[in-house]
Amino acid sequence: MKTYKHIFFDLDNTIWDFDKNSREALFEIYHKHNLSELGVSDPNFFIEKYKERNEMMWEQYRLGTIDKLTLRDKRFALTFWDMGLDAELAPTALADDYLSISPRKTILFPHAHEVLTYLSAKYTLHVITNGFEEAQGIKMQESKLLPYFQEVIISEHTGFRKPEQGIFDYAMNKTGASSGDSIMIGDGLEVDILGARKVGWDTIYFNPEKKSHQEEVTHEIHTLFELLHIL
Ligand SMILES: [Mg+2]
């Protein structure tokens, strides 16, 4: 068993409950902009279609086929299109409002603060995240997560995105960590787990929905609380 010094956390859907926070923000903008009057009669349908479109565009962004501005500005118009409506009906303020409301939501996975308090007393903690710099900074600030972490490594700032090796090398340089004393905790089998394994780190797969998979992981957990028994 390795002796860990550095624990690297993914942020979205590992500590910060992206799905719940995003849902709350989408409900809020749905009502604020009276989307029912524009022909979107069911907010759940709007949220479901937005989610599909957003995931598709994030994948395009990861592959480099669209840029950040296209992702940000077009996802709502295209969601309207996906709902069978005229894309031009989508209020242009949806994009900005979502961006300002969503990162200010503060729903974390159960036991997050308790577990981070325990771990930060024993290890040096860091975040490695693929999100955008402004949004991730606001999330950490508003959810009162900053005090637990020494380094917050954001893909946009490093020029690499998980699972690219560059971001893990950057993290080791920045923190003084080595592959022998590092462990990565994340909900993304490909971005977090495979990426970290490629640079020789141990891994903890956070799998709250208990999805089945074939990946090789050092540990698997379904709640953050289980970290207290592992680390
Ligand atoms: Mg994640």
Image (cartoon, rainbow, N blue to C red):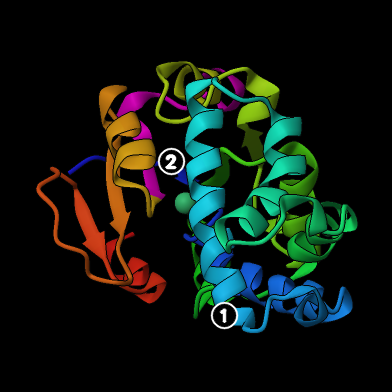
Q: Disc 2 marks which residue?
A: 5
Picture coordinates of residue 59 (x, y %)? 47, 36
Q: Residue furthest left?
A: 214
Q: Residue at x 85, y 79 (%)?
A: 34
Query: What amino acid is found at the position of numbered circle 2 in the picture?
Result: Lys
Left/right placement of residue 142 relative to residue 158 reads right
Residue 154 in view: yes
Q: Which residues are magenta?
A: 173-185
62 relative to 103, above or below: above
* Cα gap from disc 2 to disc 1, whole angstroms: 44 Å
Q: Earlier in the sequence, mark 2 or mark 1?
A: 2
Depth check: give the residue in front, 52 or 141.
52
In the rendered view of the protein, which quadrant contains the N terminus?
top left
Q: Quadrant of residue 194?
A: top left
Q: Residue at x 72, y 51 (%)?
A: 87
- Kindly tell me whether mark 1's CB lies below 8 Å from ligand 1: no
Q: Which mark is residue 69?
A: none
